[in-house]
Amino acid sequence: MWARCHRVKNFTFTTTTGLQGSGKSYGNIYMGWLLDVDPKTDEHLFTEENVIFNPIEFVNKVNRPDHIGQAFMKDEIEMDANTRDQFTKLTKIIGDVISTIRYKRSIIFFNLPSEKQLESQIRRLRYGTFDFKGVSADGTHSNFIFEKLDYPRKADTDYKYHKIVRRDPLAVNHLLGNNFFKVTYADLELHLPFKLHNFSKILANYDKRKNEYLTSKLEIFKKDLEKLENSSKKASLQMYDIIDMIEKNKDKFVVNGTLSLAELQRHFGISQNQCKLVIKEYKGRNGISKEKARDKKEREKFINTIKNSKTKLKDLIAKHNI
């Protein structure tokens, strides 16, 4: 990953997936700290400022790296969009940015819930992928898998291996005497150097910045919920106001015994769907009123029938001296 930037004149782009609390953010910070090193002085150049939450800040920073091989990490991308559609658009925009800044020879870590949430063309730019499985029960390390990716480049072929992505886990060649042998590391453990003051300071500052970012996001979500609640109350009040106005001006809105959709739209400036809701509410309210009036009329008729019957019975008794 380091050599691609410093020796091959390329860039390194990896994605990191894993459940919340699986260790992927700390893992990426460690990888960035490990790889972003001055080749002349061995000084670690990665800081908490290279972990970026805001999408616009991320675009600005990756577009202006300070040096070759500078590492950047985009964290908490799932928090940057309120809807699935917004999330898809956001990842595509950031992916397009990554595609255009390859010549700047940076190392980019991209945290997201699932690989599938990236556009296929952006996934093809990846060198590899980290998949964090979680922190060990004793809290001493994180478990993860790293796979180097090799995407197919051939078309118009029926050979199945030309159509699938090759995923190779980390493998290292070892020299034993005069012979080489390969060791494949499918399951890895990441033990972070917490005892190193400079590294642990980066983690502490990262946690502080992340907390501030999430707190600001919660405030935004709270305001969005308040707006939603207020708009719902306002819509309800508007419905009652519209119905009351229709009741007071039936000659204007009622045509041949039916509410005119065109008149409602013209007068109140509401959509067809809103008009239909108003008409439904109006019919429901007036339907109840008609039913009550009909019941009252039937009760009055029944009572009058009984009264008339009693009167006729009295007249009949008086006539025949019964």
Image (cartoon, helix red, strand yellow):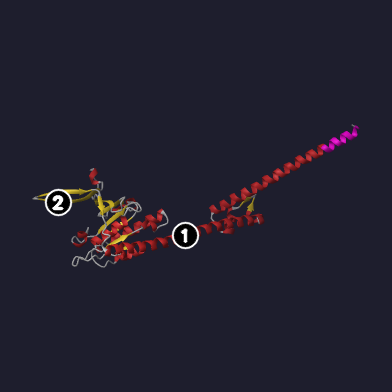
Horizontally, is 188 left or right of 81 in the view? left
Q: 96 and 251: which one is in front?
A: 96
The one of 143 and 103 positioned closer to us in this rendering: 143
- What residue is shown at x 84% (from left), y 35% (from top)? 313
> Residue at point 77% right, 41% down?
303
Q: Residue furthest left?
A: 178
Crowding near the residue tagged with mark 2, few <14, some 14–19, many ≥20 C-alpha atoms within 10 Å: few
* Mark earlier in primary sequence (2, 1): 2
In the rendered view, does 301 fall on the left or right side of 55?
right
Regarding residue 24, the answer to whether it shows in the image is yes
| Percent coordinates x, y for residue 168 in the rendering | 22, 49
Report whether 68 appears left or right of 84: left
Callout 2: SS: strand
Residue 174, labelled with which disc?
Answer: 2
Instruction: Identify residue for label 1.
Output: 222
Task: Locate the N terminus by quadrant.
Answer: bottom left
Q: In front of the other: label 2 or label 1?
A: 2
Q: Please, is residue 272 above or below residue 198 in the view?
A: above
In magenta, the rendered stretch is: 310-321
Whether residue 54 is visible to the viewer of this picture, yes or no, is: no
Viewer-closest of 115 and 204:
204
Residue 112, position as x, y percentages in the image: 34, 54
Task: Name the amino acid type tagged 1.
Answer: Lys
Quadrant position of residue 64: bottom left
* The quadrant where residue 216 appears: bottom left
Mark 1 neighbour density, 10 Å: few (under 14) some (14–19) many (20 or more)? few
